[in-house]
Image (cartoon, coloured by chain):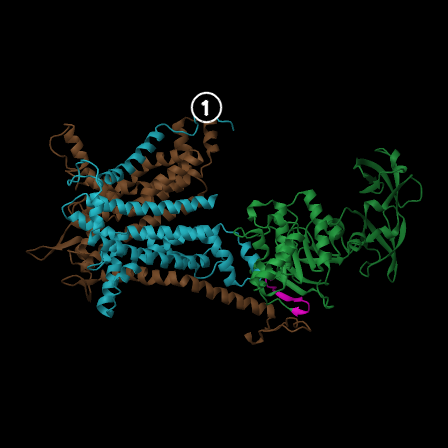
Amino acid sequence: MAAVKGVDLRSQFGFHTIAIVCLVVLYFPILILIIFSVNANDIVAVFSGVSTRWYEKAFYNEEFHNAAKNTLIIAVSATIGSTIFATLAAVATTRVAPWRGQNAAYMVINLPLMVPEIITAVATLSFFALLGSKLGLNFGIGNIILAHLVFCIPFAYMPIRARLETMDLTLEGAAADLYATPLKTFWHVTMPLLMPGISSGAALAFIVSFDDFTITQLVAGPGQTTLPLYIWAMIRRPMTPEINAISTILLGISILFILISFWIAQRRKA
Amino acid sequence: MVELTGLPAVEAKNVSKTFGAGPDAVVALDNVSVTIQQNEFFTLLGPSGCGKTTLLRLIAGFELPTAGSILLEGQEVAHLPPYKRMVNTVFQSYALFPHLTVAENIGFGLKMLGRRRAERDAQVEKMLRLVKMEAMRNRKVHQISGGQQQRVALARALAPHPKVLLLDEPLSALDLKLRKEMQIELKRLQHETGITFIFVTHDQEEALTMSDRIAVMSHGKILQIGTANEIYEHPVDRFVADFIGETNFIEAEVMQRIGNQGQIRLPSGLSIKHELDPIAAVGGKVTLAIRPERIDLVKPGADCQLSGKVENIVYFGTDTHFHIDLDTGGDLMVRVQNRRGFQEVLKTGDTVGLRIAPEAMQVLKD
Amino acid sequence: MATTELTAPTPGPAAPEPAPSAQLSNAQQAAVRIEDKARISRWLLTAPAFVTISIFGVLPLLIIIIYSFLKAAPYGGVVWSPSVEAYVSFLFQADIFTDELVFSPDFLQIYVRSFIFAVGTTVICLFLGFPTAYFMATRSPRQRNWWVLLITIPFWSNLLVRTLAIMFIIRDEGLLNNVLIGLGITKAPITILYTDFAIVLGLFYSFLPFMVLPLYASLEKLDFRLVEAGYDLYASRPKVLFRIIIPLSRPGIIAGCLLVFIPALGAYVTPLILGGGRHMMIGDLIAQQFGSGRNWPLGAAQALILMSAVLVALFFYVRATTGKMKHGQG
């Protein structure tokens, strides 16, 4: 169909404007936050010159280090664990002849996505409190990791499953035909082809764990700070642009992983 | 060369395969038995849904038979998974590994068998030369053409030197010229390697040109097994006669029988002697199958078995098809080579006699 | 009867034909064994994920269900004696003087307000998100990729930080007021923070991408030839929009609304930062019971009431989508 210049039949009046407005609205506050993180001034809302002193201050901040360290430990552990679990579960539940527990497994795996975060948070808090008081079990930071594991699994699961669904099943048959045992088939054929999905799932799991506030806040014990919790603590105190700096760092890391995940998806399409 | 041990390469004994259960169950194979010899180019021929691919998959190990047994060189294998059978498959969709190069694809089977690096590389080289793909060895699958992919699939399946090679309609995605070339290639490869080839196709012409023996299948059963000549000249029933090449069918009546010989009366009234199946009863009807090229057109009134009027003439370059309306009802198609002869002067509407030798008439089971 | 398992197949006579009795052929035995192995391996593979979520996800939910029927302990936690006082105190408070139970609308108010906020947010997101998603879906593939990336970034960005960014702007000492005062439009700062408006603004800001992306996914698959057909049949632009485009994108609209409504209803971060404790929503109300409120059973009860509302919403979603399948395309 030849394109006729002038009237785009598919366009609707005003939609272009609304779209641009939405984009501006979404990014404006973030940009302001970032801009003011290089504010030379003490007062958060008045801009007076560019300076990186707040980043330096954060850099030498003991609390910041501690929070960053904890956040990384939790996020990396939760990512590794959830990606492995999600990969195994995806392989068993995707494109296989329906088996008896399949629906139940699928529902349970996706459950964390259905429940509002605050409910999961208080439920997890209650659970660990019970564990601590009745059984004397407290895994320290492991409590947080376990809580994160629960909601990271479905986030890792989805891209892996999506990737698996587009895979050519005859390839695994061909591998078996060529003397590969099921284990060898998984290692030499399924895994390499699944890699984009696994990477994507891992990136999502990392972001979700790294950014989590609600669940972490309710489950964390004394001394267990993560970066989002640290920022929250800083809101309660007299505010300096340091909070902007740390927020920008946090944002930067999230965006980095989003870009990575996006890039992987783009490569897959090529 | 494969050592010939005297045992059949593949034997299927009373094999049945049903998918699903209850009212929705599909019977893909119904009590099928076939023996395939070593160093044979054996073809399973039939329309879609006849069960030929299912039988192939049973031999490969991708399915287990519901009943019956499958033997490879005399050993029961039906309970063995595909990776334990010395059988390799060339898939219809090629199923090449997209994350591996051509060379890595070809060497995959040997790698899984645990062969050492040097041995693998040597064999891969040999295979690349065999299918003339040396230049492409480091290419990825998506960088080569369909025909080239097909050759890589072939090389990959041949590299581990299996006892039997299974080919599931491997040429169906190729264009005509490439197909013809590959048909010759495959035949050559089979001779050179001595590996038993089991070839699945729905193209009867392909089957006739390439095979040592053919099994014609329909609706989960094997109707006839034989050489190309046997199947073409002596089809056992209507389906086989109709599926292979073109055939004319004429109803006739059994007049008399003495043992295996009988008198059959053609619609024109003429009786001929013919061998009869024990089933054909006196007074009953039989169907005769006659190949179009076995009918001679003669002047009306001359010594002939049937007569009719020319309804349509279709010119084909190498030969001409005459569609004849029979005097006694029904019609026949006669194929005559385009050279000097009586048929040159025929026009539509002319009356003509049809001479058919008795041995050109095949009595069919139904 | 796996004792007939062949370890080394021996050449010679083939296996006996299957007898009419219960004796299974080797192949059938193998089939059964493979089925069993497959089933076990599938359970084993899903086990890590299944067990983890069951123990640390499902079990905790069961625990708070139980907690909601227990008594509150003085300094937080529960006393293991059954009681429905948590649910009772949701609607009734004991009068300080008479000890009679009097209907107290405080909690109910919060729930109703949250519901209104959630509905309002959904509507606003729909009104602004639909044109955005439609616009995105009608760009060239290359432009589309950029738009999707631009919307995806806020979608996955830290919610706390984004809410903080809003706070910075609308505070009394924030950017907006500074600009207004600086331009002379107002003399004193306009109070925006810690109002209902701030919360709805925050909710809208948080969840707009959650509406746009599902809508976009649905609109991207739209067959625009149907739109052209509409124009061909003399329909005007608005008619095409309302009669063709919107009905065809119904699944996306429903998905987007659900993806905004449920988190908005249970929002915690937004009212926490923008509500200042005075304009509470269900989320920070529940959290309060587990914190300074020291009433875990009440918090659990409140959480379950929220969960019921969510389940009702999900129920309608399932009905809306499967009902559609029964009646054919809208």
**Residue A103 % position (x, y):** 42, 57
Shown colour of chain C: brown
Q: The green chain is which one?
A: B
At label 1, counting other C-alpha atoms closer than 10 Å, the crowd grade (few under 14, some 14-19, many 20 or more) is few
Any magenta on residue C200?
A: no
Q: Look at the picture and state if C40 lies above or below C162.
A: below
Chain part drawn in magenta: B61-75
Residue nearest the observer in this picture, A169 or A263: A263
Looking at the image, residue C295 sits to the left or right of residue B268; the answer is left
Residue reaching furthest to the left: C97
**Residue C83 % position (x, y):** 19, 63
Residue nearest the observer in this picture, C3 or A255: A255
Give the position of the N terminus of chain B as an image quadrant. Answer: bottom right
Looking at the image, residue B59 sits to the left or right of residue A127; the answer is right
Q: Look at the picture and state if C39 lies above or below A38.
A: below
Q: Look at the picture and state if C273 lies above or below B6.
A: above
* Residue displayed at 77% across by 46% down: B246
Any magenta on residue B63?
A: yes
**Residue C154 % position (x, y):** 31, 42
Chain bearing tag 1 is A
Shown colour of chain A: cyan
Query: Which residue corresponds to mark 1?
Result: A5
**Residue C256 % position (x, y):** 35, 42
Q: Quadrant of residue C26?
A: bottom right
Instruction: Give SS at disc 1.
Output: loop
